[in-house]
Image (spheres, helix red, strand yellow):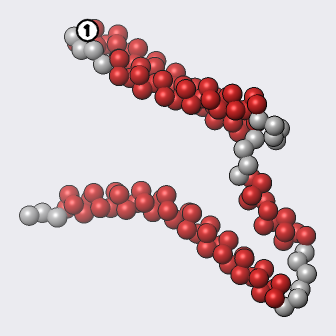
Amino acid sequence: MDATPIFVVFIIFSSIVAVIVGPSFLKNRERREMQLTVRHAVDKGQTLPPELIDAMTKDVEKGLPSRTKDIRKGVLSLATGFGIAGFALAVDNASRDWGGNGEGALLGLACIPVAIGVAFIILGIFNPNKA
């Protein structure tokens, strides 16, 4: 039995996991080291400079939803849905020559990003955060 196909599949899935898990692991480790440094400084009675506090709260503020982020995500999702729908209509025109019917599933699939895009645009309109 040849182990090459199993090895290739293992490499593909492990690279996907590494791309997804790697950055979050490194960011978590950096955050943990920063908290440990701050804890040692507070235990020794040192005052924390305002720049350090700003640097620590920057990530929290960056993750907050904003109007422009929601509208941007909504427009991108709408474009994705319309792109899939356009592809479905192109498949419909081509499948008439071949006798197939493949556009129905693709048009149904296109409704998902369109609905998500509309929801993000509505959230962007009603979001109180202007930034």
Quarter of the image where the N terminus is located:
bottom left
- Residue at image location 81% in from the left, 88% down from the top: 43
How packed mark 1 is, by other alpha carbons closer than 10 Å (few <14, some 14-19, many 20 or more), is few
Q: Quadrant of residue 77?
A: top right
Disc 1 designates what residue?
Answer: 97
Residue 94 as seen in the image, left or right of residue 64: left
Which residue is rendered at x = 46% and y = 24% of the image? 110
- Residue 35 seen from this side: yes
Compared to 103, does 128 lie above or below?
Answer: below
Q: Is residue 72 visible?
A: no
Quarter of the view holding residue 76: top right
Amino acid at dot 1: Asp
Instruction: Give whichever of 94, 68 is nearer the camera.
Output: 68
Q: Residue at x 42, y 56 (%)?
A: 16
- Taking 119 as reference, is 93 left or right? left
Above or below — where is 117 with respect to 24? Answer: above
- Position in image of residue 102 (x %, y %): 30, 19
